[in-house]
Amino acid sequence: MFAVIYLPQFHLQAVWRQEPELRASPLAVMDDAEPKAAVMELSAAGRAAGVSLGQTSTQARARCPEIVLRPRSRAQEEAIAGMLLQGAFCFSPRIEATAPHVCTLDLQGMPLLATFAQNCASVEDWAQRIVAAFDQMRLSAQVGVAETPFLAWQAAQLGRPISCAGAAEEIVAALSLEKLGLPTAILDRLERWGIGSVNAFLALGREKIAERLGVEAAEIHDGLRGRESRPLKLVTPPETFEEFLEFELPVETIEPLLFVLRRFVEELSRRLGAIYLVAQELKLQLGLAVGAPYERLFVIPAPTSEVEALFRIVHTHLENVRTEAPIQSLRLSARPGRSGQYQFGLFETALRNPNQFHETLARLGALLGSDRVGSPRLRATHRPDSFEMEVSRMANGVFGEEESAGEPSQVCGLALRRFRPPLPAVVELRENRPAWLRSSWVSGPIIALKGPVKISGSWWDEKRWAREEWEAQTRDGGLCRLAREQEHWFIDGIFD
Amino acid sequence: MKAASANGIIQLRRVLAERFPQVPAWTEGVAARVHPCWPTGFKRLDESLQGGLPTGAISEIVCDGGGAVFLRSLLGQAQQRRQLMGLIDGCDGFDPAGMSAAALSRLLWVRCHNAEEAAKAADLLLRDRNLPLVALDLQMNPNGQLRKISATTWYRLQRIAQQSGTVLVTLTAAAMIPCAEVRVNLENRFTLADLDKEPEDIARELKFAVTRSHVSRETATAIAEAG
């Protein structure tokens, strides 16, 4: 048994996906590959207004002044073709990309076929689920199930939107000659012969059809008789989930960009959700009018298909992006993955909302500078105040290192409050020891002193440094750390 | 039979407390507590506050010596409870030196240039709701900057902390937060000799005065209701 998923009005659906507001309008998709663009697909409203296929844009407008004309959207058509395969793969692992708008599924070995001979309800339910899944992706699909790929394709075209036929005769009875895909010359000849139905066509017999109408018609005859049994050319669906739009006019402000971006995120989320996947990474690409495109990869801390969470991550970043040229195109792709399942420690406290935390870190980074937010990590050096800010681990919800042996278990005694940069000071020396201190923070005679501690490092390269440190207590009670570096005095900080 | 099962539970609690010392044990003190609290790590202060700093409220620590020690103690508690702590450093003065990598890895350090930035950062972190403890350190910020933070800002932060259940601790040089649930004055003068002391000794000797407390307010309410 085979099933065919067919996307009718393929070119129109590609346009509607980008401009859903045109669904009710008279719309014609023009084939721009022709020297003179002609209508290649037409919405029901357009057809009702008297426009027909093959007309030029002038002729179409003459018939219906309100008609909206759109060129083929090849990027959207590619996206839909990918979605068709991705959606079909959820229902059978053996699929064929028969055409951009047609996907054939091999149902061999599927449990639902066990009861098909007695009752086709289970197959109809299954087909209904396919239609619902595509409906969730805002695509209208028709499904046909039959014994051969050809019959399944014919059944799918019947447009009910589900057609599950156990025998070839049921489908043949419902078909018309025009739907068989016979060349126009053969159709004309059959009409002249007075043959107006598929049953009459089949009654001619295979030999006579082959003799008088050629091999092509004979093959269709075989297909209708259920004798065709070609192997499927199996494919795997593309693993990329991508949305692309080229703006008619370059975009210079964030608002239109965000508008489109939100729709993209919604679309990607819908596509991922339909096949039970979540986004692990988002890749944003802004094509600029001049110069190389701007690219940014977002790793999602807690993979999700939630629109708000995904949109906020991109939105927060874009608030601080300045491009050198207007934006010509927008591409957003998602790397899919399975929904994350973690086993935390019994007493480990997880973040309530890692994605929210990631966004907050991004906002704080935008407010203060990315180097001023994060978890401090001490550098392996004796140089005072030497640390680096680590944000990536924390942003990904990873925090808390196990305590390693040898390092201080908690805190040292008195803590220093540092001045960054160190506060310049004037120090009066007596017997080469600080005796009087003057600075903008603390001034006065030094009544107690500890030091000096002479430290140096990196003497082997150009970053060499050397300093001496004193702990000093002034008469007014202030306890501070003094440092002398290259004959200049500073207050590193006060003990608090 | 009942006595036997009660003894069993007590023994089980004891075994668990020995096996997992980092997990706060269920004690009589915890049971008696009305609101969940965040211990400061200073035993006497925690006793005065009946467990520690209240969650979902602002606790103002007015520092005249000992603010940095207090902050480090809070971070030690966060490490012990395996929680994250946010430190909004109003003047970029926190010194991570001398602290373990394990403790630092639980710290989100936000290094601000001035008090205005610190207030904005506090707003963002509280709204985030991921951190159970946020410390806003404004002790070193000049008065001119602090005066620019309006009272409505503090009320807003208090409301957000209340909604998110976050412990918001502010360190200031002078009392300035009208809606602080708890106010503790730290008054300490350190000498050179204190540099050689162990953290436990400094914690034990830390001088403080609780000038406003949710505990006293609850007691007063209870007395009024009883009367």
Image (tube, rainbow, N blue to C red):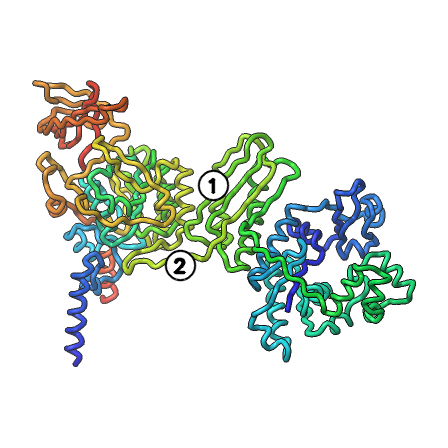
Which amino acid type is shown beneath numbered disc 1?
His
Q: Which residue is mark 2?
A: A341
Where does the C terminus of chain B fall, quadrant-wise?
bottom left
Q: Quadrant of residue A416?
A: top left
- Please report the residue visible at 16 percent of the width from the left and 65 percent of the height from the top: B15
Q: Quadrant of the N terminus of chain B?
A: bottom left
Query: Looking at the image, how many numbered discs can be counted on the residues?
Result: 2
Dot 2, how many residues are within 10 Å of its Cα: few (below 14), some (14-19), or many (20+)? few
* Image point (40%, 45%), residue name: A360
Q: Measured from the top left, where is residue A210 in percent x and y?
A: 82, 63
Q: Nearer the viewer, residue A108 or B105?
A: A108
Q: Chain of mark 2?
A: A
Q: Which residue is mark 1?
A: A317
Up the image or down, A462 lies above or below B148; here it is above
Q: x, y percentage for residue A1?
A: 64, 69
Q: Is residue A195 left or right of residue A144?
A: right
In the image, residue A365 lies at what x, y percent?
A: 40, 39
- Quarter of image, res B147: top left
Classify residue B214 by image quadrant. bottom left
Front one among B154 and A141: A141
Write down the chain letter for disc 1: A
Instruction: Using residue A264 as the reference point, say whether residue A379 is left or right of it.
Output: left
- In the rendering, at what x and y percent does residue A269 appear? 53, 54
Marks 1 and 2: in contact by CB < 8 Å? no
